[in-house]
Image: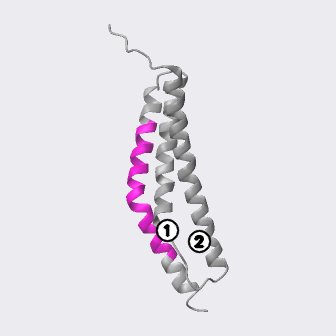
């Protein structure tokens, strides 16, 4: 039976830290953009700016969070994922990828309908 050589602790920590940084950045972009959108709607701004990319960052952040947690469990702690958790991670990443394509359009439609019915009737 062959054993797979383990990468150094520094490499494993840096890779998990990199994915964690990307995850935090994605969630930060989403929170800032959605906060700005809500602020514009509440202030009855003449122009409402909606960033579909921010909604996409939400799903990307969720996928990256799953990869980060999996990297921490396997890379840092050296534990294998049980089949149950492996299946859960796989399903989570697939759902995250599907939502990247579907959710931004659905949210854009909802925001568009809300602003047209609410703000245009003023």
Classify 10 Å Cα crowding around label 2: few (below 14), some (14-19), many (20 and above): some
Q: Which residue: 46% across, 71% down? A: 108
Asked if the magenta segment contains residue 91, the reply would be yes
**33 and 104: which one is in front?**
33
Q: Quadrant of the C terminus?
A: bottom right
CA–CA distance in space, label 2 to label 1: 8 Å
Query: Does residue 88 sit above or below 48 in this rendering?
Result: above
Query: Does residue 12 sit above or below 43 in this rendering?
Result: above
Q: Circle 1 sits in a helix, a strand or a loop, which is it?
A: loop
Q: Report x, y in % for residue 26.
A: 53, 52
Q: Which residue: 50% across, 61% down? A: 54
Asked if the magenta segment contains residue 106, the reply would be yes
Q: Circle 2 sits in a helix, a strand or a loop, which is it?
A: helix
Q: Quadrant of the N terminus?
A: top left
Q: Which residue: 55% across, 59% down? A: 30
In the shown orientation, is residue 49 left or right of residue 98? right
User: From where the camera sits, is residue 79 visible?
Assistant: yes
Q: Residue furthest right?
A: 43
Label pair 2/1, CB-CB below 8 angstroms: yes
Q: Which mark is residue 6?
A: none
User: From where the camera sits, is residue 78 visible?
Assistant: no
The segment highlighted magenta reads: 88-111
Query: Does residue 28 sit above or below 93 in this rendering?
Result: below
* Residue ID for mark 1: 51
* Residue ID for mark 2: 37
């Amino acid at each position: 039976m062959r054993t797979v050589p383990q990468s150094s602790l520094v490499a494993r920590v840096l890779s998990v830290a990199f994915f964690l940084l990307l995850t935090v950045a994605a969630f930060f972009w989403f929170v800032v953009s959605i906060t700005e959108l809500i602020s514009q709607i509440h202030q009855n701004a003449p122009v409402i700016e909606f960033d579909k990319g921010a909604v996409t960052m939400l799903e990307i952040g969720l996928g990256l969070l799953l990869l980060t947690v999996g990297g921490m469990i396997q890379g840092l702690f050296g534990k294998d994922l049980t089949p149950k958790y492996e299946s859960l991670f796989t399903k989570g990443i697939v759902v995250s990828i599907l939502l990247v394509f579907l959710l931004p359009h659905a949210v854009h439609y909802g925001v568009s309908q809300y602003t047209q019915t609410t703000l245009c009737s003023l």
